[in-house]
Amino acid sequence: MGKIISIANQKGGVGKTTTAINLAASLAALEYKTLLVDADPQANSTSGIGEDPKQVKAGIYECMVDAIDPYECIIKSEIDYLDLLPSHIDLVGAEVELVNYDEREMKMKTALEAIRGDYDFIIIDCSPSLGLITVNALTASDSVIIPVQCEYFALEGLGKLLNTIKIIQSRLNPDLEIEGILLTMYDMRLRLSNQVVEEVTTHFKSMVFDTLIPRNIKLSESPSFGLPAISHDAESKGAISYLNLANEIVANNEQLAEMA
Ligand code: ADP
Ligand code: MG
């Protein structure tokens, strides 16, 4: 059974999509069969691995709202072991339409339940909101990764996100865990960056991943080539750091499996 991990933070620009694409590609590089689910109407994960959102006829939206078979929407990417369940702009409408449905928080869970047996990991890129689609993603997930940008106001909004996670744990998904807080866009030369790392690790301790994601040009430019960083420049600091993150997650989950 594949492990389902959401990448969530209602704050925009913190590195959710960059993390979703590059973590998924790194897990695939380690030969784990991986599905990247684009649950953001901006469809940046879809275009970031080289698919044109305008060509997408059906994606996660249709799976949720029209109960379309996810197998009809899944696209094999150019990368071995990596598939995409894409998004397109209509996902904006899903938020509104879903409100009228019974069990409206469970639609993504139902859709992914049918296919999770085919994958080792399913990575969901969430939108910058705590609306119904994100609630669906968190309800469908085993765990959540929270990217936090090493910038001013890094912790802003984190309380609200953690509170939302608590509510989902108590009402919709008691098994939801926090996989980890991921510090992104770290610049070792900047005092501010180091202060944020210190503040976040003091506050959240072992919840914070050992892997830090540096600010790296290869990470910001690779989406314009429709590639994850590991395919664009495997030697870059950005690509290597996401590979380290994938290894850290795999190791943490093996430890858990041994303890169980
Ligand atoms: P989100 O999905 O949370 O809105 P993105 O992943 O799209 O955030 O990142 C926001 C912007 O920052 C994008 O332009 C992206 O290319 C850039 N970016 C993200 N992570 C890094 C990084 N580690 N180094 C350099 N640029 C980054
Ligand atoms: Mg995004």
Image (cartoon, rainbow, N blue to C red):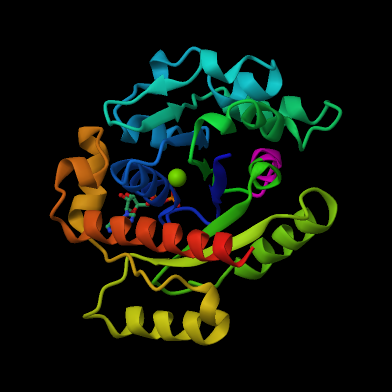
Total count of labels: 0
- When the figure is inspected, residue 74 is found, relative to residue 154, above or below; the finding is above
Q: Nearer the viewer, residue 207 or 29?
A: 29
Q: Nearer the viewer, residue 174 or 101?
A: 174
Q: Is 233 contained in the magenta span? A: no
- When the figure is inspected, residue 29 is found, relative to residue 71, above or below; the finding is below
Q: Residue at x 36, y 59 (%)?
A: 247
Residue 238 drawn at (x, y percent): 24, 57
- When the figure is inspected, residue 22 is found, relative to residue 63, above or below; the finding is below
Q: Which residues are magenta?
A: 130-136
Q: Is 129 on the left-hand or right-hand side of 172? A: left
| Ligand 2 rendered quadrant | top left
| Secondary structure mainly formed by the magenta segment | helix
Q: Is 91 on the left-hand or right-hand side of 150? A: right
Residue 8 drawn at (x, y percent): 55, 53
Q: Quadrant of residue 52?
A: top left
Q: Is 132 on the left-hand or right-hand side of 232? A: right
Residue 259 drawn at (x, y percent): 60, 67
Q: Quadrant of residue 82?
A: top left
Residue 105 drawn at (x, y percent): 77, 38
Q: Is 134 contained in the magenta span? A: yes
Whether residue 179 is visible here, answered yes or no, is no
Q: Residue at x 61, y 15 (%)?
A: 69
Q: Residue at x 19, y 40 (%)?
A: 231
Q: Residue at x 24, y 78 (%)?
A: 188
Whether residue 159 is visible here, answered yes or no, is yes
Quarter of the image containing the N terminus?
Answer: top right
Quarter of the image containing the C terminus?
Answer: bottom right
